[in-house]
């Protein structure tokens, strides 16, 4: 505006040429300063946008890292043990807590001589030291086809059909797998059987017998004695 005013005065032969040139130079310098200011403004605006985007990215990364430091379980269940104290460093190689579901898995070890008789879905009778007077029903749900070379046994899994009121991990069980059924059978305690082929009759005489199914407690007698035969427990 000062330059235009001075130009109008000069057109009317008012003022000096030097003063007009000074106003024109000031006007040109102002234009340069304005262009520089606009350039600085645009640069600062880009820098602020870049800083804003970086801050947003850093925030998202921080949120992801925060989730990594929160220990979560993939299942609903019961915490049986916490392996770390507050303030201890944890890593992915060691379990922080031991969590179990309400559905317990029964792990069974089956001798290689008996594994061919075991099938999925078979009924299992469970006895436990924790519940000495009770018997529980279970069923086979899985059989590992690979034999343990060290124990010469196979691993199978079962679940409770009728289960105790309260269970804890790593309890021991004695399992009888039902591989066959009969309406009536003659059985004797297994400790009465001698060399898996004979029994001791009352009076001391040995009697050969033919055996059928057996477990750790009972053995089925097919031939050799009947329900009226009196037998004695062999002396060790």
Image (cartoon, rainbow, N blue to C red):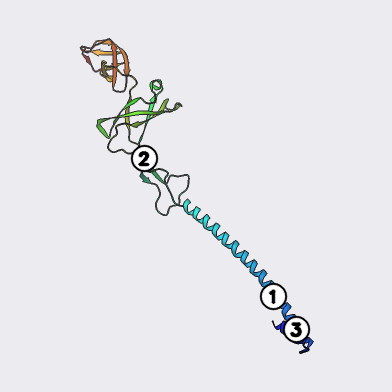
Q: Residue furthest front?
A: 12
Q: Which residue is mark 3?
A: 7
Q: Is residue 217 left or right of residue 75?
A: left
Residue 13 image point, x, y percent:
78, 89
Which numbered dot is residue 201?
none
- C-beta proximity under 8 Å, tags 3 and 1: no
Residue 84 image point, x, y percent:
40, 49
Badge 3: residue crowd in 10 Å (few <14, some 14–19, many ≥20): many
Q: Is residue 90 left or right of residue 136?
A: right
Q: Is residue 121 above or below residue 188?
A: below
Of tags 1 and 2, which is closer to the observer?
Answer: 1
Residue 65 image point, x, y percent:
50, 53
Helix, strand or loop at label 1? It is helix
Badge 1: residue crowd in 10 Å (few <14, some 14–19, many ≥20): few
Quadrant occupied by the N terminus: bottom right
Q: Nearer the viewer, residue 59 or 233?
A: 59
Q: Residue at x 69, y 75 (%)?
A: 33
Of tags 3 and 1, which is closer to the observer?
Answer: 3
What's the CA distance linking mark 1 and mark 2? 74 Å
Which numbered dot is residue 33?
1
What's the CA distance linking mark 3 and mark 1? 22 Å
Helix, strand or loop at label 3? It is helix
Q: Residue at x 26, y 33 (%)?
A: 131
Of tags 3 and 2, which is closer to the observer?
Answer: 3
Q: Is residue 199 left or right of residue 153?
A: left
Q: Which residue is mark 2?
A: 101
Q: Nearer the viewer, residue 16 or 206?
A: 16
């Amino acid at each position: 505006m000062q330059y235009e005013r001075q130009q109008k005065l000069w057109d009317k032969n008012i003022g000096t040429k030097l003063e007009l040139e000074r106003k024109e130079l000031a006007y040109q310098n102002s234009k340069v300063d304005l262009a520089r200011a606009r350039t600085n403004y645009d640069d600062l605006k880009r820098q602020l946008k870049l800083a804003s985007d970086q801050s947003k990215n850093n925030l998202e990364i921080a949120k992801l890292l925060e989730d990594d430091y929160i220990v979560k379980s993939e299942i609903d269940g019961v915490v049986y043990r916490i392996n770390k104290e507050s303030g201890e460093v944890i890593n992915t190689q060691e379990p922080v807590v031991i969590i179990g579901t309400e559905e317990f898995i029964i792990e069974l070890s089956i001798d290689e001589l008996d594994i061919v008789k075991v099938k999925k879905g078979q009924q299992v009778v469970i006895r436990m030291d924790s519940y000495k007077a009770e018997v529980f029903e279970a069923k086979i749900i899985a059989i590992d086809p690979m034999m343990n070379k060290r124990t010469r046994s196979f691993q199978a899994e079962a679940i409770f059909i009728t289960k105790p009121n309260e269970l804890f991990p790593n309890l021991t069980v004695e399992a009888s797998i039902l591989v066959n059924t009969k309406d009536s059978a003659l059985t004797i305690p297994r400790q009465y059987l001698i060399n898996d082929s004979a029994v001791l009759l009352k009076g001391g005489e040995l009697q050969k017998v033919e055996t059928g199914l057996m477990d750790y407690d009972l053995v089925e007698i097919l031939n050799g004695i009947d329900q009226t035969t009196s037998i004695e427990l062999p002396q060790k």
